[in-house]
Image (cartoon, rainbow, N blue to C red):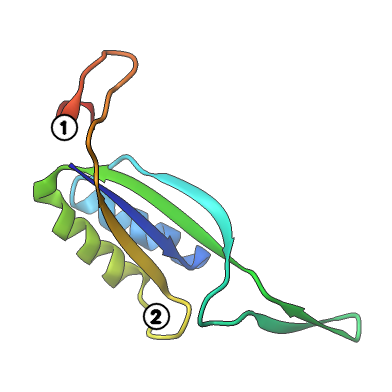
Amino acid sequence: MKFVIAVIKPFKLDEVRDGLHSIGVDALTATEVKGYGRQKGQTEIYRGAEYNIQFLPKIKLEIAVADAQCEKVVEVIQSASCTGKIGDGKIFVLDLEQAMRIRTQETGENAL
């Protein structure tokens, strides 16, 4: 099993979710986070005063998938979240040692 973590722009969440649903991935966790990277923040003007915002809003997705599905999941996230501009985000893939569905006590890929 694999654990896919993706950090994307907030307005791309629906596209990514729809793409994942189309390949049979119906379970994911989405968290509102703030991040700092090459994008280096942005400058905004509020009531005539200029503010430099260092940490920009992002969405962090966490998805547990079977090994066979992992490559397709990464492809869908990349294609659905890409704008071609700096700050599109990152995708990380980790090995997932164990999973358990609490209600039924199913383990491994059956728990996904």
- Identify the residue at horizontal 72%, vertical 85% (top origin): 43
* Nearer the observer, 94 or 46: 94
Name the residue that disc number 2 marks.
83
Residue type pointed to by label 1: Glu
Using the image, tell me which numbered label, if any, was put on residue 71: none
Quadrant of residue 18 within the rendered picture: bottom left
Q: Quadrant of the N terminus?
A: top left
Q: Is residue 26 above or below residue 33?
A: above
Q: Is residue 85 above or below residue 36?
A: below
Residue type pointed to by label 2: Thr
- Identify the residue at horizontal 41%, vertical 52% (top origin): 61
User: Which-is-in-front pick, marks 2 and 1?
Assistant: 1
Quadrant of residue 105 within the rendered picture: top left
Expressed as whole percent of the image width and height from the top left, the position of residue 38 reads 51, 82
Name the residue that disc number 1 marks.
109
Expressed as whole percent of the image width and height from the top left, the position of residue 4 reads 30, 52
* Nearer the observer, 63 or 17: 63
- Looking at this rendering, what residue extends furthest in the left direction? 68
